[in-house]
Amino acid sequence: MKLFWIFLLGPFFAMSQTAIVTAEGFLKQKQYDKAVTLLDTHLKSNSSDLKAIELLGDAYGHQKNWDKAIITYKKLVDLSPKSANYHYKYGGALGMKALSVSKFKAVGYVGDAKQAFLKAAELDAKHIDTRWALVEMYMQLPGIIGGSKSKALKYANELEALSKVDGYLAKGYIYEYDKEPELAESYYKKALTTGGSVVCYTKLTQFYINQKQPKKALVYLHEGYKIHKNEDFLKQIKTLEN
């Protein structure tokens, strides 16, 4: 009997996997309309396929169709409520929707987004992206609707415990946003010393550009280009030198 069911369901699983792989290919090629059409069709007969639902939400997100992304990610949360990543994606879609509407309408979306991110953080103590989202949200929100530098620093500290580079970058972001450039610079430099990645060079050089210190930005752009051969660094060097 077991062999019978394997024989019977084998083609079904193969077809399902083919749809997923094809949809992933469409997303990589930025053919989002094709991905949506394929996944919509696939889900009509496979309504609980979590991977397909997630990819459909991702496709809607790339299209900036936040209403459909929210509905789709909500299905994931309902089907798998203990997945931190699903709560994170749901919160992200809600947050992006909040940015696209009036401040009055945004309040409800922001509240739901914060709850989704907090749930994701609760479910996964090592979910870095969620903690970054909370840092940015608590810094960008006005205090009257839940903004809080102290809470942003709480999650920056959690990031630092998981990844020193992410923690330093988060603190650099917080202090730059809060107009404390000396502290921001010190943390961006700590991140660069610790990690030395393209992201670290980008954050520090962009900080100097924002502070109207192009000479300092050029020093690190040249250094970063020498190490990473990143074309964006070269473009910025030419722009600043001109």
Image (cartoon, rainbow, N blue to C red):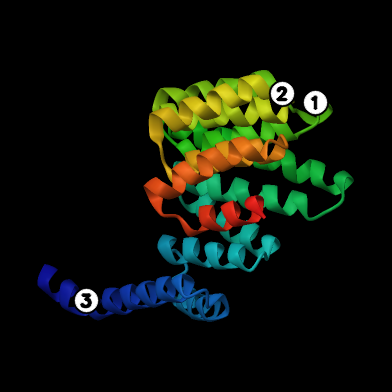
User: In which quadrant of the rendered image does the N terminus lie?
Assistant: bottom left
User: In which quadrant of the rendered image does the C terminus lie?
Assistant: bottom right
- Callout 1 crowding tier (Cα within 10 Å): few <14, some 14–19, many ≥20: few
The disc placed on residue 143 is 1
Image side of residue 184 versus residue 161, left or right: right
Inspect the image, locate mark 3, and give the three-letter code of the amino acid beneath it: Gly
x, y (%) of residue 82?
A: 45, 41
Closer to the camera in the image, 227 or 67: 227
Closer to the camera in the image, 92 or 163: 163
Count of picture labels: 3
Identify whether 55 is placed above or below 86.
below
Tag 3 residue: 10
Inspect the image, locate mark 1, and give the three-letter code of the amino acid beneath it: Gly
The disc placed on residue 163 is none
Q: How far apart are the two marked residues, 3 and 2, measured between alpha carbons?
A: 53 Å
x, y (%) of residue 119?
A: 55, 35
The disc placed on residue 148 is 2
Precedes in sequence: disc 3 or disc 2: 3
